[in-house]
Image: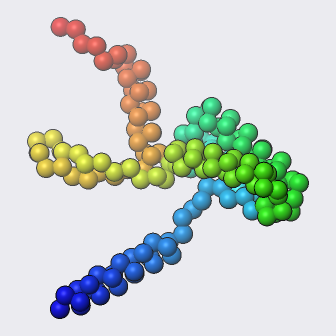
């Protein structure tokens, strides 16, 4: 009986790991060839505009992403694929990719953020999830509303 439970657990664990591995993650940037990279870079630059997936990337981060994309393009211009680059060039390429991916992952509008919140009048917490873009839009709209109404948050009696 105990062995059966262990076997069932092991099979369940193996199936769940297999399902996670089969689920493809959407890497923001993966420079392999010049042609593929150019398409990815154009898509990233387009999605950093208003309404895009990475619209909440701030000015400094946008400049950093653009400079790192230019750096990768220059590296790939010297070879037909990333495999043909020297070890030093591959290191620079990977570092630039990691920098871009770190910024884009942090500011991904599709990233789901969940928190435990107790509704008004209750002590029982419930899970509330929203995307990064929804949270940023709500924060921006609240800030704009306060500016329009002239409410600076200071109350006088």
Residue 74 spot, x, y in % from top left: 83, 48
Q: Residue at x 30, y 18 (%)?
A: 153
Q: Quadrant of the C terminus?
A: top left
Q: Residue at x 41, y 27 (%)?
A: 143
Residue at the extreme top: 157
Question: Is residue 47 among what the camera can see?
Answer: no
- Asked if 21 appears above or below 66 in the picture, the reply is below
Instruction: Give residue 61's position: percent from left, percent from top.
Output: 61, 36
From the viewer's perspective, is 135 left or right of 77?
A: left
* Residue 46 in picture, x, y percent from top left: 68, 48
Q: Nearer the viewer, residue 154 or 72?
A: 72
Give the total number of marks visible in the rendering.
0
Q: Nearer the viewer, residue 89 or 104?
A: 89
Q: Residue furthest right?
A: 78
Residue 63 placement, left or right of 113: right
Name the residue nearer the viewer: 17 or 113: 17
Closer to us: 38 or 74: 74
At 63% across and 50% down in the image, what residue appears? Answer: 98
At a point 87% along the width and 53% down the height, the residue shown is 77
Above or below for 156 versus 68 = above
Up the image or down, 96 lies above or below 148; here it is below
* Image quadrant containing the N terminus: bottom left
* Residue 59, quarter of the rendered image: top right
User: How is the structure coloured here?
Assistant: rainbow
- Residue 134 screen position, x and y as percent: 43, 45
Could you tell me if residue 156 is visible in this image?
Answer: yes
Q: Is residue 43 above or below residue 25?
A: above
């Amino acid at each position: 009986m105990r062995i059966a439970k262990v076997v069932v657990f092991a099979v369940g664990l193996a199936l769940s790991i297999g399902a996670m591995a089969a689920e493809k993650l959407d890497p923001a940037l993966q420079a392999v060839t010049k042609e593929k990279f150019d398409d990815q870079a154009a898509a990233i630059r387009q999605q950093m505009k208003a309404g895009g997936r990475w619209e909440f990337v701030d000015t400094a981060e946008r400049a950093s992403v653009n400079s790192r994309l230019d750096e990768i393009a220059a590296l790939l211009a010297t070879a037909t694929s990333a495999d043909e680059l020297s070890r030093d060039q591959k290191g620079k390429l990977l570092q630039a990719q990691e920098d871009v991916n770190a910024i884009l992952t942090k500011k991904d509008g599709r990233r789901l953020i969940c928190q435990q919140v107790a509704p008004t009048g209750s002590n029982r917490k419930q899970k509330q999830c929203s995307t990064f873009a929804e949270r940023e839009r709500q924060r921006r709209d609240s800030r704009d509303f306060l500016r329009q109404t002239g409410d600076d948050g200071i109350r006088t009696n």
